[in-house]
Amino acid sequence: MSETRTPTRYRKLVIHQATGDFRSSTSVVDEAWRDPGSGEVLIRNEYAGCNAIFDKNLCRNAVRYVDVQPPFDMGVEAVGKIVAVGTGVTEWREGDCVAATRLGSGYREYQIAAASKPIKVRDATAEILALIPSGISAMVGLERIGEVTAGDTVAVSAAAGGLGHFVVQLAKLHGCHVIGITGSDDKLAVLRELGVDRPINYRREDLREVLAREYPRGLDVAYDSVGGEIFDTFVDHVAFRGRVVVSGHTSDFDQEIEFVPQPRAYRKLYWKSASIRGFQNQAFPEFFAEAAARILDLYYQGRLRALVDPTPFTGLDQVADAVEYLLAGKNAGKVVVKLR
Ligand SMILES: NC(=O)c1ccc[n+]([C@@H]2O[C@H](COP(=O)([O-])OP(=O)(O)OC[C@H]3O[C@@H](n4cnc5c(N)ncnc54)[C@H](OP(=O)(O)O)[C@@H]3O)[C@@H](O)[C@H]2O)c1
């Protein structure tokens, strides 16, 4: 154990009552220390990733595959260092840097994980945290669900966000023409730096008009995590054999379901042989190990940037601030919380 003194307790964030709102649902509580058991490792979390939409959905008990019964441990992804290994663990040593993703293990100072679960990384940095799992999701969603190929015209919404900035870069690496959509002029500059061919601020330019005028052939891949009018526009502008990837719907995830009078979807898709494909990373675990190895490799080679939003959030008491910041759409890149 490399810690100078073993603490008897540590802190974690829990839902104490699912009110629908993150701040009032959650509180920081103490957890009693426990040493790792056989086949387990103890990780000291250095940074936790903010998944505000998922976090808020937990506070609404609206995540389809989870039943939130308070007290409920919060946070999914973290990077940190192994500080103790249990009996029988041979693959890890104290001081090893890891990334770990498991529901309930992110927003806490320490976590215990099965030794087979963490991913070995070179450093426990905020950039590595951005890659795992947002970069992995971007890669799986774009390649496996969007079936991207060289020469495709690819449109990406929330293109400067934690997930989106990886989608645009990966599409460029695949040799695509990339349209990056954002809601702010500041983020247009970010998109240009990432190599986006046609950045669009949809609040200033009419997305439908731009696509009709500049992309009459349509979109081969339209990667959407915003929903609403952006999703409708993507469906209307999908190309022959094009794929619209539904990777989230940030703009209305916590709103009443909107009923929109539209022609039935097959009217828009059939003659184009186009498709709308849902992507929720939980459903595709078989692709994750390979994608994790490849995304880290691209980053280590300097071929992929991991953007971390510069606004600092420190400690478990500021997780709610981080969540509200992301929900306000202010971020560019991944929002992280520094835990040490
Ligand atoms: N499919 C999966 O497995 C998977 C995995 C991870 C995340 N997700 C989903 O992907 C989406 C992005 O997640 P993220 O953590 O990377 O967030 P993010 O994209 O970093 O942040 C959300 C962004 O959405 C945009 N936005 C558009 N309309 C908005 C509105 N009404 N309110 C707030 N923001 C709005 C904003 O960017 P602009 O100003 O540029 O529009 C904002 O910065 C979420 O819906 C999340 O649930 C899905």
Image (cartoon, helix red, strand yellow):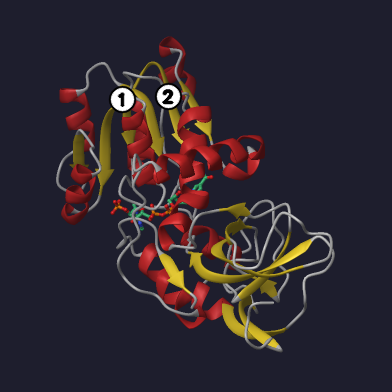
Q: Which is nearer the eye, 244 or 167?
A: 167
Judging by the rendered image, the residue that carries numbered circle 2 is: 148
Taking the image as drawn, is residue 84 in sight? Answer: yes
Q: Position of residue 187 (x, y in %)?
A: 22, 52
Could you tell me which secondary element the residue under label 2 belongs to? loop
For the point 43% across and 66% down, the residue is: 336
Q: Which amino acid type is shown beneath numbered disc 2? A: Val
Cβ atoms at labels 1 and 2 below 8 Å apart: yes
Q: Is residue 1 left or right of residue 335?
A: right
Q: Which mark is residue 176?
A: 1
Foreground residue among 140 and 155: 140
Q: Position of residue 171 (x, y in %)?
A: 35, 31
| Label 2 CA crowd tier, 10 Å (few <14, some 14–19, many 20+) | many
- Dot label at residue 43: none
The residue at 41%/57% (across/down) is: 127
Of 165 and 274, which appears nearest the observer?
165
